[in-house]
Image (cartoon, rainbow, N blue to C red):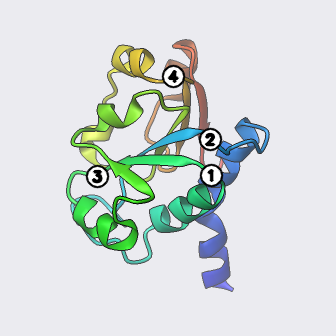
Amino acid sequence: ATERVNNRQKLVVFQKLARHFGGLLKGKKVAIWGLSFKPNTDDMREAPSLVLIEKLIDSGVKVTAYDPVAVNEAKKYYGSNFVGYSDNPYDTLNDANALLLMTEWSEFRILNIEEMKKRMKDLVIVDGRNIYDASELKNNGFSYYSIGQ
């Protein structure tokens, strides 16, 4: 039962994204920040990002990802055929319809909101780790979704 609940939780970010776009995800571009299971490791075993990326690819979404250390591990799962990788988090945002935060790396905690607004096509953030200030993002024009709220 616990494993079933944990697996269901891994889909919450995807469900929030799909709900925002009315289920119409095909052709969207999504940026993912954080691929590893937790910060300060490249371990992707049981990482929520694996389940999320599978669902996104199956839905026809173009995925671009950044993680400070787990990119090489991610390439073992997906190569470069289905997922694009960036050298810095803000490059993933170019023309993105949404940003999905999956790992709470310290470098993701402070946002350059103006840079994000310049790069993103749609100002949508699904925060899978609840690290951002909802009111700050909403006051800057973002649609913001967090977990459990």
From the viewer's perspective, is residue 3 above or below residue 125? below
Discs 4/1, front: 1
Q: Which residue is mark 2?
A: 27
Left or right of 77 in this view: 29: right
What residue do we see at 40% from left, 32% from top? 93
**Which sits earlier in the primary sequence, circle 1 or circle 3?**
1
What residue do we see at 55% from left, 60% from top? 52
Distance from the alpha carbon under mark 1 to that under mark 2: 6 Å
Amino acid found under the numbered disc labelled 3: Asp
* Quarter of the image where the N terminus is located: bottom right
| Circle number at residue 67 | 3
Q: Which residue is mark 4?
A: 137
Query: Which residue is farthest front?
Result: 81
| Circle number at residue 30 | none
Instruction: Report helix, strand or loop for mark 2.
Output: loop
The answer to whether residue 70 is seen in the rendering is no
Distance from the alpha carbon under mark 2 to that under mark 3: 23 Å
Amino acid found under the numbered disc labelled 4: Leu
**Which sits earlier in the primary sequence, circle 2 or circle 3?**
2
Q: Position of residue 7 (x, y in %)?
A: 61, 74
